[in-house]
Amino acid sequence: MLDSEHRRAGWARRPGALAVARDASATAPAGAAELRAIVALTVLAAVLRFWGLGHQGFWFDEANTSLLVKFSLGKMLGLIPQTESTPPLYYCVAWIWSRVFGDGEAGLRSLSALCGVLTVPVAWAAARALVSPRAGLIACALTACNPLLIWYSQEARSYELLVLLSALALLTFAHARLEPSGRRVGAWAVACALALATHYYAVVVVAPQAAWLLWEHRRERAVAIGVAVVFACGLALIPLALSQNSTGHDSWIGHSPLGLRLAQILPQFLLGTGTPLRQPLKYLAFALALAALALLVRGGPAGSAGQRGALLAGGLALSGFLLSLFFVAAGSDALITRNVIGLWLPAAILVSGGLAALPERRGAASWRPAVAAGLCAIGLVAAIGVQASYDLQRPDWRPLARALGPRAALGRDRLILIQHYRTLLPLSLYLPHLEFVRGRHAVAHGIRELDVIAISSPQQPLCWWGAACNLIPSQMQARYAVRGFHEVWLRHVERFTIMRLESARPRNVSVAAVARALRTTALANDELLIQRA
């Protein structure tokens, strides 16, 4: 009888476990109005994520994904340790997905877009379980409108799958801490294991949750087993992680200024990777987020279940961030915003808890919807601004490939020099049979066409995402003095400028001869390309 009264009052007890308080309304079934709001926000999220999905071409990181999924499954799995710095789950899912929806821009990115849409109702359920139904609606709206999540929902990489699985881990954690049954803890363990198999930085999401469950339910056998399973899954990934670390794919991160990377995280959590009117929107977004935290501290009775749930979510986000700093101190530095994106939802639930808390004074209630609406509006302005700004979008190499045209026009090999760009991808996706001409003494035989390409792009400090600002601009010379070649045309295509040089007869062209012709730039060993017949 006493136990049933506790349950009706919003308490759950298990033998040997701590009593965990919860808001009874958080576990009540959602009403029709609440469900309609969730459906509307999910539809909004779908529009924002699927609209213009194939408008931007693949940038370098996405081109790696597109190239990998073209191979057989076994070949792809063998290449991942050599070419990628993340575990294989996303690529396996993308491999299957591409067989159904295609490996083009829209087809491959639609996997991430779907993950982004599914994150919205999961965020609602997680915030509802941790804090309250009102917090769930606010978290749902913030998730639907967040420009960082929208950006990575339109990228053919693992980050949005990481966000979805991290959200599922948080949701199952919220239920497991209230009632640590084998089924609930098992669901949490599965979500954590899948998140770890998607991205190594899922550990900053998983480890704080595991520590909390062990501390709060240290006598529960199911919790001990669940945490042990997650720990074992993490250990199983260590050999692959060490192998990938030896390739140095992420070494550029550690060589970038840590202070600049840390300064990017909060603004990008609020505004995404780039937006017009960045400074005014940043200050306004910071002000509204701080107002929400102040409302959490001042609103509602101290120590209420909703307040404790919001603070718990914030504590998980802070603990995960501190863990990422520990990795930096330990010499494993890959700390950039996209790698800790799994911490976005618990941080958003902290803010949502402040905006959802019932105020002690009636007049304070009017500010809370305005603050929530303001954060959503800022997110929409930033996301739409990125879509509308050419400089903030991913560079599109497809028009460049079309402008270069088919090599069959001359029927022979041709040389291509992209100044200050030293990789085959993504151009090789759209212009097949490309390879490097290696070595200063290398000679390309039978060449009648030389295409020199300069890039114009905006620059900003430490731009590592897919926007055009990650390209290095170069200057097109008035002429390139390569013996026997003369200019036939000069064209501007998107952010590329192409100068085509031709010879009246096939010639042997050395790398040294091309290097001598350059005045505004230098030629690296892996910068001159040849398109084979």
Image: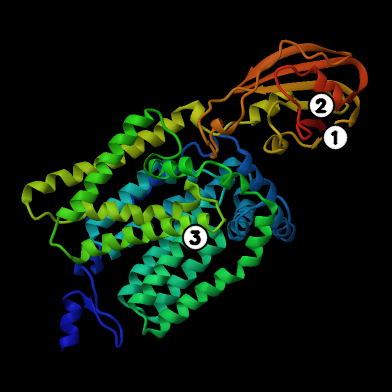
Instruction: Work out whether residue 205 or residue 525 is closer to the camera in this orientation and state it.
Output: 525
* Quadrant containing the C terminus in the rendered view: top right
Is 152 displayed left or right of 452 in the figure?
left
Secondary structure, mark 2, is strand
User: Percent position (x, y) of residue 494?
Assistant: 59, 23
Q: Which amino acid does label 1 sit on?
A: Gly
Is 444 displayed left or right of 495 in the figure?
right
Of pointers 1 and 3, the one earlier in the residue sequence: 3
The residue at the point 52 percent across, 65 percent down is 194
The residue at the point 51 percent across, 76 percent down is 229
In this rendering, the label closer to the viewer, 1 or 3: 1
Looking at the picture, does residue 69 appear above or below residue 277? below
Of pointers 1 and 2, the one earlier in the residue sequence: 2
Q: How far apart are marks 1 and 3 (CA)?
A: 41 Å
Of pointers 2 and 3, the one earlier in the residue sequence: 3
Q: Name the residue under label 2.
A: 415
Image coloring type: rainbow
Q: Distance between the residues labelled 2 and 3?
A: 43 Å
Q: Residue 202 carries which label?
A: 3
Secondary structure, mark 3, is helix
Secondary structure, mark 1, is loop
Q: Mark 1 points at which residue?
A: 439
* Quadrant containing the N terminus in the rendered view: bottom left
Q: What residue type is labelled 3?
A: Ala
Instruction: Work out whether residue 519 or residue 367 is closer to the camera in this orientation and state it.
Output: 519
Q: Count residues near mark 3 (Cα–Cα under 10 Å), then give few for <14, some for 14-19, many for 20+.
A: many
User: Percent position (x, y) of residue 268?
Assistant: 41, 42
Q: Count residues near mark 2 (Cα–Cα under 10 Å), then give few for <14, some for 14-19, many for 20+.
A: many
Is 409 displayed left or right of 177 in the figure?
right
Q: Count residues near mark 1 (Cα–Cα under 10 Å), then give few for <14, some for 14-19, many for 20+.
A: some
Q: What residue type is labelled 2?
A: Leu
Residue 35 visible within the image: no
